[in-house]
Amino acid sequence: MSDQYVVDRDPQDLTIPLRGATFGEAVKRFFRSYFRYSGRASKSEFWWPALANLLAILVAVGVIVTGGVLGEEGAGSPVMAIGGMLIVAIMIVYGIGGISLSVRRLHDIDQSGWWYLLIVVAAAVPVVNIAATIAALAIGLIEAKPGGVRYDAPRAQRDRLFS
């Protein structure tokens, strides 16, 4: 990607996307922007939390497998239940924050966040859900567009700049 989209790289500034975010920076920004639907998110900010989610799920699956191994002695069921509860908790935590992250990522590719609603609705329709899954993945793969900057400015400024 060209340098024209890179402003100052400040991990604390949540008003602009952090290009080339590290794993730790991206996960911190994920939780600091948990309910924030305005602004933009870079590709690295999108994919690092997804990796963290996958790793957390794998740990929970490991707990379930451990419970299965212990199951012969009768101690497995509670351990498996804990693993199952962990998976549900991880999915809820990532699911809620993932919605706002996806909306910010759509803004970075200069698309309305309302497209995410279409993806979610399409995912509920059999056969169409395959296309919805591909669209959800594509959000993280498409390069940033210069027009996405309009999602950074406050509404009054944006109306003056882009009207």
Image: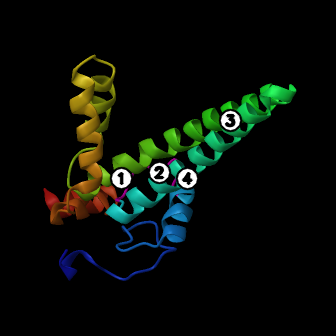
Q: Amino acid at mark 1?
A: Arg
Query: From the viewer's perspective, is residue 15 above or below residue 73?
Result: below
Relative to 124, 87 lies left or right = right
Q: Which mark is residue 55?
A: 4
Among numbered discs 2 and 1, the one appearing first in the sequence: 2
Measured in 3D between alpha carbons, the distance from the residue under mark 2 to the one under mark 1, in whole angstroms, is 8 Å
The first of marks 4 and 2 along the sequence is: 2
| Residue corresponding to mark 1 | 104
Which amino acid, mark 2? Arg
Q: Is residue 36 magenta?
A: yes
Q: Position of residue 134 (x, y in %)?
A: 24, 39
Viewed as shown, does residue 64 lie left or right of 20?
Answer: right
Q: Are marks 2 and 1 in contact (CB under 8 Å)?
A: yes
Compared across the picture, whether 134 is left or right of 43 comes to: left
Can the viewer see residue 114 in this picture?
A: no
Estimate the x, y position of residue 127 in percent, counting from the top left: 23, 20
Residue 86: image quadrant is top right
Secondary structure beneath label 2: loop
Q: Which of marks 3 and 2 precedes in the sequence? A: 2
Q: Which colour scheme appears in the figure?
A: rainbow
Label 2 vs label 3: CA separation? Answer: 33 Å
Q: Position of residue 155 (x, y in %)?
A: 31, 55
Please tell me whether residue 128 belongs to the stretch shown in magenta: no
Q: The residue under label 4 is which amino acid type?
A: Leu
Q: Position of residue 74 (x, y in %)?
A: 86, 25
Task: Give the labeled residue for mark 2.
Answer: 36
State which mark lies toward you, 1 or 4: 4
Q: Earlier in the sequence, mark 1 or mark 4?
A: 4
**Disc 3 designates what residue?**
64
Image: magenta residue range: 33-40
In the rendered image, the quadrant that contains the N terminus is: bottom left
